[in-house]
Image: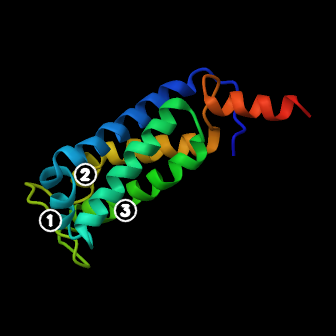
Amino acid sequence: MLKTDHDKTTILIRFLVGSVFLFEGIQKFLYPALRGAGRFERIGIPFPEFSGILVGGFEIVCGLLILAGLLTRFAVIPLIVIMITAIITTKLPILLGYGFRGFSLRNLEVYGFLSMMHESRNDLAMLIGSVFLLIKGGGYWSADLKLYQRKYSKK
């Protein structure tokens, strides 16, 4: 899980994914009614108080790990789950044009595929960036590479 390549450009994706999740997580604690438990309750997420803290905590911790390139592959796994959940709970109703299974539909002027794609651009970018890091690892400027080299250079 620590093994990574020597690609120097991976840091760009790490910076993008890590910083977005870090600051989104912080906002869940600073503005819980808008970004955390309050939003989760409006969407229809079960146990919104607990879920808001859990998701915000994972976003902060995993965002920091990704920025450092430390345990990058492990750190993106919960974020991938978070993004898939976000797409199902908030973007799928936009595609369908109605809420389902307790997940509410936001009031928009237009519903359907194009509206869903517009509304999910950030979610999709974070999901794809996270999958990229799951496949590639932390890259050249990462703690993962340093740890991997240290571990296997002694053998």
Residue 144 point in image, percent of width and height? 65, 34
Q: Is residue 52 left or right of residue 99?
A: right
131 displayed left or right of 150: left
Between tags 3 and 2, which lies in front? Answer: 3
Q: Nearer the viewer, residue 152 or 73?
A: 152
Q: Is residue 74 above or below residue 16?
A: below
Q: Amino acid at mark 3?
A: Thr
Residue on which the image places disc 3: 85
In front here: 75 or 133?
75
- Crowd rating for badge 3 (residues with CA inside 10 Å; few <14, some 14–19, many 20+): some
Which residue is painted at 25% across and 54% down in the image?
116
Furthest-bottom residue in this view: 101
Q: Which residue corresponds to the image point at 78% horizontal and 29% vertical from the top-left?
A: 150
For label 1, the SS is: helix
Q: List x then y, in percent, for residue 22.
A: 36, 38
Secondary structure, mark 3, is helix
User: Which residue is painted at 26% across and 72% down in the image?
Assistant: 47
Task: Judge left or right: residue 103 versus residue 130.
Answer: left
Q: CA distance from mark 3 to mark 2?
A: 20 Å
Crowding at mark 2 (Cα within 10 Å: few <14, some 14-19, many 20+): few
Q: Which residue is mark 1?
A: 42
Q: Which residue is mark 2?
A: 114
Q: CA distance from mark 2 to mark 1?
A: 23 Å
On the image, the x and y values in percent for residue 84 come to 40, 59
Judged from the image, the secondary structure of the residue bearing numbered disc 2 is helix
Which is nearer the eye, 41 or 87? Answer: 41
Question: What kind of residue is marked 1?
Answer: Arg
Which of the marked residues, 3 or 1, is nearer the chain's N terminus?
A: 1
Of badges 2 and 1, nearer the viewer stands: 1
The three-letter code of the residue at mark 2 reads: Leu
* Depicted 6 relative to depicted 113: above or below: above
Judge the density around disc 1: few (<14), some (14-19), many (≥20) Cα neighbours within 10 Å.
Answer: some
